[in-house]
Image (cartoon, rainbow, N blue to C red):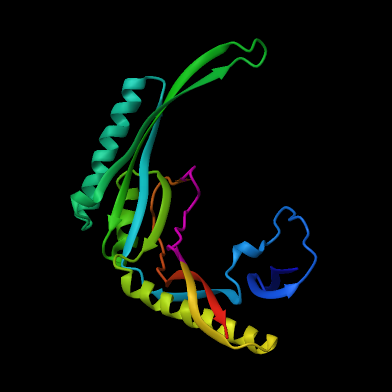
Amino acid sequence: MLVLTAILVAVGALGVAVVSAQEITPMPPGPGDIRPADFPANTITVTGIGNASGEPDLAYVELGVEMMNADLATAYAEAADTMQNVIQALVDAGVDRTDIRTSSVNIYPQDQYDPETGMPTDRTYRVSNTVRVTVRDVSMVESVINAAVNAGANTIYSFNFAIDDSVALEQQARISAVENARQRATELGQALGVTIGRPVVISETYGAFQPFPIDGRGGAMFDAAQSALPVSPGQLEISVVITVTFSIE
């Protein structure tokens, strides 16, 4: 009986499947097995990876103010007043007011307990106010952060660079991924003694830029900025992964 079976050949971390016609005894498929119907007949399927790098032209900073007081109204007022000072300092540092967005306002009651009786003794309130700042000139990042901290900001929750228009980098990465897939298929075809034909199935996965948090979701605490905070934008890399099924001639 003639059936189609898929033979999996592992190359590094990428899966490659070659489908050919041969006479075998049919076996029930097991969990994770590649079935003949998963790939077209007489084809080879490879994964290609393409990367492109560019200098970031945007920075996103999420920073805020946290105040604690036994009186909720006092803590709230202190946080609000300090945040107003922070926002004004950001504007004075060159950030457009429309690029400053409030991301959260939270109130956390915190109770203290008597270790002997387990009964609550005192309650304080922690009030936090956080803004997300878009810096459109990466050369200003250091001065913007230090201006905010000097004005009273005492938390930094996240910080990452980005590229505003990444279309050109995506195109470069996509072309590189296609070339990589063709090269892999050709090398495998030579090793298997077959000729690679035209692509018959193509799928793409786009990998966005990765953020670089300073201290996770908990934030990093500061008392004051005594000197400039060194920040290096470096390069950002974008990736495109494509899976291509080529015919075998």
Say which quadrant the C terminus sits in: bottom right
Reply above or below: 142 against 200. above
Q: Residue at the spot x=32%, y=23% of the render?
A: 74
Q: Which image quadrant for residue 234?
A: bottom left
Residue lying at the far right in this picture: please name it.
25
Task: Tell me which corner region of the image, top left, top right, bottom left or bottom right, holds residue 38.
Answer: bottom right
Q: Residue furthest front?
A: 1
In terms of depth relative to the viewer, which is nearer, 112 or 172? 172
Q: Residue at x 65, y 75 (%)?
A: 18
Q: Residue at x 63, y 85 (%)?
A: 189
- Left or right, 248 with respect to 159, comes to right
116 relative to 247 in the view: left or right:
right
Quadrant location of the N terminus in the rendered image: bottom right
- Range drawn in magenta: 204-219
Closer to the camera, 206 or 68? 206
| Residue 31 visible, this orientation | yes
188 is higher (above) or lower (below) than 28? below
Residue 216 magenta-drawn? yes
Residue 20 coordinates in the image, percent (x, y)? 67, 76
Would you say residue 56 sits in the magenta stretch? no
Residue 98 rendering spot, x and y as whole percentages: 19, 50
Count the marks.
0
Q: Residue at x 60, y 72 (%)?
A: 41
Q: What is the x, y in percent for residue 91?
A: 20, 52
Rendered view: 99 above or below 6: above
Residue 228 appears in view: no
Q: Please provide percent x and percent y for residue 2.
A: 72, 70
